[in-house]
Image (spheres, grey):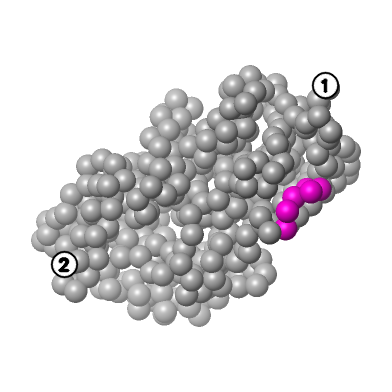
Amino acid sequence: MSFDFDATVVGAGAVGLACGRALSKRGLTVLVLEKEAMIGQGVSSRNSEVIHAGLYYPTGSLKAKFCVQGRRLLYDFLDSRKVDYKKCGKLVVATEEAEIPRIEAILEQGRINDVEGLELISGSEAMKLEPQLNVAAAIKSPESGVFDSHGYMLALEGEIEAGGGAVVTSAPFLGAEPVQGGGFKVRVGGEGATEVTSRLLVTASGLSAQKVAAAIEGYPADDIPIGHYGKGIYFRLSGPAPFERLIYPPPIPGALGTHYRKDLGGQGVFGPDLVYVETEDYSVDPNKAQEFADYIRRFWPGVRAEALAADYAGIRPKLHGAGQPQPDFQLHGASAHGIEGLMALFGIESPGLTSSMAIGEAVAKELLADS
């Protein structure tokens, strides 16, 4: 049977585009469908734009593997495509003596995860690097950075199109039906509503992952994990940025906690916090500035609540609720759901952006293993 496309990817965020690029560079014609009017308008555009080194994630987890691999691939890709980034480094700080064992455990996990260049430094050494810090000790991570995530996604889109593929926006995925003998009929909505055929199908749809999987005929309901919305807000600092490096306190349950970055424009940004919500609510309550300031003061005593301006919010596609253990990325192939040629991705939250190229490579290798 001939197909309109070799592969169709649902979702034009960083992970979907990276999957499309990985398939395209293997010679496949790729269609990427995006329900929004532009690429990268969901989870991928509402994050910290941080390149994570890979310190925190459990030994042998996909998060640990893909973060380290993805970060190395990402820096190489950004260099080769002239996408803006800054490898500014990160300090994971213990703000009091009681927190030092926590960051020592993070240091050990980072080394197990094969993160390069990690070093435990004293509070005085950390303050020589960042004089405004309140710090008892810190992990110095030279591989961490910040980057232009939208420029990155545009570069991925360009590679897909250069390979003969297409990234189509305002084109919501309505459903898919496996075809006898292999492949899929894919229903596409929007003004140009149509049906296309595709040999392979990848769902990388972030917050819509569960809904998209349920719209594939024959997808077993018991293979669709329950999803949760983890909202985080950000505040932007008026005035000079206090630190050159990323500053992270020890993680909170379910997230890395409210941290600091100096963005590529030179401004200081703090966030995100974590609140579980039921809907995609992207409002930011300016009255939370004092709460943010109280938290930030632990590592930056000089913060003033009146210097924090409400900025933006993001929602992470979590697979756990409040108080529950944080699970790994989930990449469900035929061994999980029984549908050949389909890869469904769930729970791709942080460090999903850093991991995106490694996730794309893993998806392409598994889908093409039997080709």
Judging depth in this view, the residue of 249 and 148 nearest the camera is 249
Give the labeled residue for mark 1: 2
Q: Quadrant of the C terminus?
A: top right
Residue 74 in which image quadrant:
top left
Residue range highlighted in magenta: 216-221
Give the labeled residue for mark 2: 136
Could you tell me what secondary structure mostly forms the magenta stretch?
loop
Q: Quadrant of the N terminus?
A: top right
Name the spot of residue 265 as percent of width and height, x first: 43, 48
Which amino acid lies under the numbered mark 1 shown in the image of this protein?
Ser
- From this viewpoint, is residue 16 visible? yes
Find the distance from the CA under tag 2 to the CA under tag 1: 64 Å
Q: Secondary structure at mark 1?
A: loop
Q: State left or right for residue 92 relative to residue 31.
A: left
Q: Report if residue 218 lies within the magenta region.
A: yes
Name the spot of residue 99 as percent of width and height, x first: 22, 70
The residue located at (36%, 60%) in the rendering is 260
Judging depth in this view, the residue of 306 and 210 nearest the camera is 210
Residue 211 in which image quadrant:
bottom right
Q: Residues within 10 Å of mark 1 (few under 14, many from 20)?
A: few
